[in-house]
Image (cartoon, helix red, strand yellow):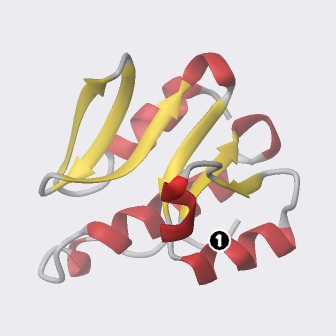
Amino acid sequence: MDSQTAHAMALDMPGTAWKEAHGRPTYSVKKKTYLTVWSYEGRAVLKLTVAQRSALIDEHPDAFAPVQTALGKHGWTDVFMEHVSDRLFRYVVDLGWRNVAPKWLLPTRQAPPKG
């Protein structure tokens, strides 16, 4: 997984806006952030639920970890891009988007298959 592909996948999500925040591309829907890409570190940070993150860590321990700041308590998750396939990344981006998108926007996107 590379940052250009991550950018394209994020912008494919309905209602997504992107901006630079602290020198990193950040993606949000209705002003709620769901993804930040840390290109130089080879990772992304996603807004997942704690339960979603736990399940992903169980299945892919090299690819996912809790963010090591206080945000980690709220489900924010490090995604180590070298350890995820494009398909798995699309799946988790969709999860993050669904976690913050307004309910009326959810039917505009069919959920992708799990990685």
Q: Nearer the viewer, residue 56 or 88?
A: 56
In the picture, residue 101 is in which quadrant?
Answer: bottom left
Residue 50 in percent (x, y) is at 58, 77
Which residue is at a point 35% across and 21% down the rendered structure image?
22
Horizontal side, residue 50 vs residue 79: left or right: left
Would you name the residue on which mark 1 appears? 53
Amino acid type, callout 1: Arg
Which residue is at a point 12% across and 81% down the rendered structure image?
104
Q: Residues within 10 Å of mark 1 (few under 14, many from 20)?
A: many
Q: Nearer the viewer, residue 102 or 8?
A: 102
- What element does badge 1 sit on? helix
Residue 111 in percent (x, y) is at 45, 75
Horizontal side, residue 38 vs residue 20: left or right: right
The C terminus, quarter of image:
bottom right
Horizontal side, residue 115 vs residue 52: left or right: right
Tell me how many marks there are: 1
The N terminus, quarter of image:
top right
In this rendering, the answer to whether 62 lies above or below 7 is below
Which residue is at a point 87% across and 51% down the rendered structure image?
62
